[in-house]
């Protein structure tokens, strides 16, 4: 009984016995130990009467030492089959009540042991016994302080039921030994290598050595050899030569043992370790166990096995006994969870980087507004051939390159302001086809596979062009020796199963845009970094913003992007964008090449002094009268007390203490007819939501040119 301290701290135990003597030698001392440890004991009897049990118990433990309410006997009819049928949920409810009652009575915990032979009497619902044992693990023993010992008479239970019962108990009490159960389905975290050895050794040793000595073991042999869910084999030599294999071996692996090359079927990454461990066992050194090792079955599908190999003498040969179970389903679920966890962490990382990028871009846009504006004003004040002009041109060129970088950062961080229109992306691809061919050159073949009934999407056209171009450039760079680029579109429905496996996806109808190449592929170790801004493998030639821009554009349009790649096989990027049930609107555009001027009065409100100065200079150049305000108080003062009309407020969206829209609403209290043009470097959900401009809002994005400002101001002032 030296294992009793371990039992007291455990939960769900199966006790298998073959005779009354074995039952008495184990159960009665366990009850005595439980009583001595201040546990409340409930005995659910069936084979043995309460009087019989008490007689055995009181021979080793005086009756007067038992506390009031500490020991009770219950028949199955009182707890298992109250309604004349077995209802697992009712039983569990009763156990919970008894556990709480034991605690309220001052006992350390509850100790319940039951004789399960009642389940063999044809009671309605007793076929739910296995289900009940599984529910007990999940709903009761994981949550409540209770030790439960289920008693199973080996002579009375059928072999197939016994095996299923073994699987549902994390611990086994058998022939005086307490063992953590290797076959317990959900017991991974409770099992150590030593316990696996004990349990498997007991089974295999019985089969090989004691099969002729004990009739009970013959029944166990039959279970193991005929059981389709447990593989068992004995091999000798290397390469392994099979001497014996059971039905489970053939069922799980799909091969018969004759001439079976086990080494060749092991997954390549696991093969060397298996060979090393197998030869070690064959030489008689010690037992080896694999929590997981992957095999290719007869259909060449990858399966996952848990294996124990032990040295053994068989037919006077040095042999290896191999016992294994199929844990593929558990392995696949764990792989799926790991994948989702990685996707979630990736999304979190990208969100953090996005917030940082947006903040940088906002400040940088303000600086660029001043740099571009002052440069343009300076260019307008000097002659074309002035020796200073080339320097100004270089400043302007550099600021335009910087502006592109900022736009890429804003696209990645999903802070670009979208002006979405209903489009068919097939039309966009067709219009870009000639440009794409020029871009990729003659060494690369362009193939388009466009769905004829593709749904419409609502998207910002320039950003969709940017997304496609960036992916094409990425594909071209992956094929320095030439190859093939395939652009594919089709309608898809992302179902619940897909969404469950792809973090951040939503169920619904989408168009899929796939761009594939036959290039070098993406190494696995960098696949989770390719969408990060400034990450590049192109050394001197890459900015690291191409794919991060694509990622941001897809996300800001309510879509997702996934990458599939194998080294030396190529890469596919799949973008999913939500379908809208709207028709395409035709629009006519006019482009003005001249500066549009005016004589109205414009109030400029911006907390950045350099931005205010350049805006005032631009407006004066365009002929407007100007007023300036650096904050809320100045703006309100001017609108209240300025003696002439103010026609337009040119206001930054975000300023210290107040937003542009809130400021304008207060200004309208004094000047109801005044109009507003908002400006900003990125979206902030004040005048945009999810990156889409609110309807009826006049907006210009920083940095802008004097040409763009002139056109936008006239558009606002001339509107009715």
Image: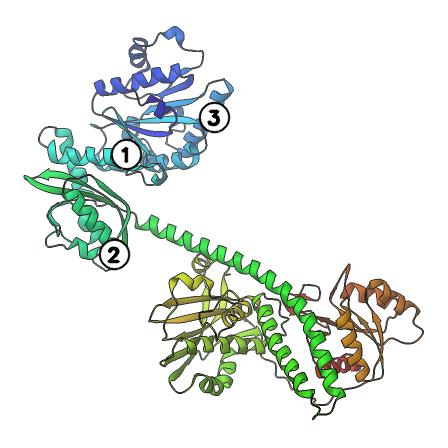
Per the model, the C-alpha gap separating discs 1 and 3 is: 33 Å
Task: Name which residue lies at 38% across and 65% down.
Answer: 523
Q: Which residue position holds label 3?
A: 97
Of pointers 3 and 2, the one earlier in the residue sequence: 3
Residue 422 in picture, x, y percent from top left: 58, 76
Q: Nearer the viewer, mark 1 or mark 3?
A: 1
**Image vertical order of residue 262 relative to residue 428, above or below:** above
**Image vertical order of residue 314 relative to residue 621, above or below:** above
Residue 315 in picture, x, y percent from top left: 6, 40
- Of all residues, the one furthest to the bottom in this rendering is 385
Q: Regarding mark 3 in the picture, which secondary structure is present there?
A: helix
| Front residue (pair 4, 476) | 476
**Image vertical order of residue 104 relative to residue 207, above or below:** above
In the picture, measured across the screen, residue 357 lies left or right of residue 606, that is: left
Q: Is residue 720 visible?
A: no
Residue 174 in picture, x, y percent from top left: 25, 27
Per the model, the C-alpha gap separating discs 3 and 2 is: 51 Å
Q: Dot 1, crowdedness within 10 Å: few (<14), some or many (≥20)?
A: some
For residue 137, which quarter of the picture? Answer: top left
Q: Which residue position holds label 1?
A: 195
Q: Dot 3, crowdedness within 10 Å: few (<14), some or many (≥20)?
A: few
Q: Regarding mark 2 in the picture, which secondary structure is present there?
A: loop
Q: Dot 2, crowdedness within 10 Å: few (<14), some or many (≥20)?
A: some
Q: Which residue position holds label 2?
A: 267
In the picture, measured across the screen, residue 62 lies left or right of residue 94, that is: left
Residue 168 in picture, x, y percent from top left: 32, 36
For residue 609, which quarter of the picture? Answer: bottom right
């Amino acid at each position: 009984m030296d294992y009793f301290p371990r039992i007291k701290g455990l939960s769900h135990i199966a006790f298998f016995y073959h005779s009354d003597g074995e039952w008495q030698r184990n159960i009665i001392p366990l009850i005595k130990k439980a009583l001595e440890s201040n546990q409340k004991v409930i005995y659910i009897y069936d084979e043995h009467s309460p009087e019989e049990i008490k007689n055995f118990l009181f021979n080793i433990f005086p009756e007067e030492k038992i506390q009031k309410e500490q020991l009770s006997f219950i028949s199955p009819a009182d707890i298992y089959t109250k309604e004349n049928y077995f209802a697992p949920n009712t039983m569990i409810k009763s156990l919970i009540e008894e556990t709480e009652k034991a605690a309220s009575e001052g006992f350390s915990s509850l100790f319940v042991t039951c004789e399960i032979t009642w389940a063999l009497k044809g009671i309605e619902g007793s076929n739910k016994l296995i289900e009940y044992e599984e529910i007990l693990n999940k709903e009761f023993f994981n949550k409540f302080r209770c030790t439960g010992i289920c008693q199973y008479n080996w002579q009375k239970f059928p072999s197939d039921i016994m095996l299923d019962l073994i699987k549902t108990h994390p611990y086994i009490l058998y022939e005086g030994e307490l063992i953590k159960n290797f076959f317990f389905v959900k017991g991974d975290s409770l099992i150590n290598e030593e316990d696996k050895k004990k349990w498997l050794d007991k089974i295999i040793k019985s089969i090989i050595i004691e099969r002729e000595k004990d009739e009970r073991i013959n029944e166990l042999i039959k279970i193991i050899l005929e059981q389709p869910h447990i593989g068992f084999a004995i091999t000798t030599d290397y390469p392994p030569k099979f001497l014996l294999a059971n039905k489970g071996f053939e069922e799980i692996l799909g091969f018969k043992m004759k001439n079976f090359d086990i080494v060749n079927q092991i997954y390549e990454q696991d093969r060397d370790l298996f060979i090393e461990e197998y030869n070690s066992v064959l030489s008689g050194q010690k037992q080896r166990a694999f929590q997981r090792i992957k095999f290719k079955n007869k259909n060449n599908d990858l399966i996952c096995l848990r294996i124990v190999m032990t040295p053994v003498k068989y037919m006077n040969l040095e042999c290896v006994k191999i016992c294994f179970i199929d844990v593929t389903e558990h392995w696949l679920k764990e792989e799926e969870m790991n994948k989702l966890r990685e996707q979630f962490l990736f999304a979190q990382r990208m969100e953090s980087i996005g917030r940082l990028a947006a903040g940088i871009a906002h400040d940088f846009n303000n600086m660029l507004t001043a740099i571009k504006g002052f440069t343009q004003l300076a260019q307008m004040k000097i002659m074309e051939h002035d020796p200073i002009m080339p320097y100004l041109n270089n400043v302007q060129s550099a600021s335009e390159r910087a502006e592109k970088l900022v736009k890429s950062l804003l696209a990645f961080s999903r802070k670009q302001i979208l002006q979405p229109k209903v489009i068919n992306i097939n039309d966009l691809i067709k219009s870009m086809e000639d440009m794409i061919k020029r871009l990729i050159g003659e060494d690369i073949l362009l193939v388009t596979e466009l769905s004829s009934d593709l749904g419409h999407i609502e998207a910002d056209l320039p950003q969709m062009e940017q997304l496609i171009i960036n992916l094409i450039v990425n594909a071209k760079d992956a094929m320095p020796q030439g190859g093939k680029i395939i652009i594919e579109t089709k309608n898809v429905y992302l179902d619940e199963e897909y969404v469950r496996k792809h973090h951040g996806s939503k169920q619904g109808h989408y168009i899929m845009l796939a761009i594939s190449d036959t290039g070098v592929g993406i190494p696995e170790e960098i696949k989770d970094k390719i969408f990060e801004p400034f990450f590049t493998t192109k050394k001197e030639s890459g900015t690291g913003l191409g794919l991060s821009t694509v990622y941001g554009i897809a996300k800001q349009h309510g879509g997702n992007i996934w990458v599939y790649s194998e080294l030396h096989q190529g890469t596919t990027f799949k973008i999913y964008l939500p379908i809208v049930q709207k028709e395409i609107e035709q629009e006519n555009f006019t482009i003005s090449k001249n500066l549009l001027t005016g004589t109205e009065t414009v109030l400029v409100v911006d907390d950045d002094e350099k931005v205010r100065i350049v805006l005032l200079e631009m407006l004066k150049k365009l002929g407007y009268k100007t007023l300036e305000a650096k904050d809320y108080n100045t703006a309100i003062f001017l609108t209240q007390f300025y003696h002439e009309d103010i026609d337009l407020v040119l206001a930054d969206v975000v300023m210290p203490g107040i937003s542009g829209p809130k400021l304008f609403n207060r200004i309208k209290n004094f000047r109801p007819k005044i109009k507003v043009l908002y400006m900003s470097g990125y979206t902030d959900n004040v005048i945009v939501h999810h990156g889409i401009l609110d309807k009826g809002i006049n907006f210009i994005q920083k940095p802008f040119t004097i040409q763009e400002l002139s056109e936008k101001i006239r558009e606002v002032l001339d509107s009715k």
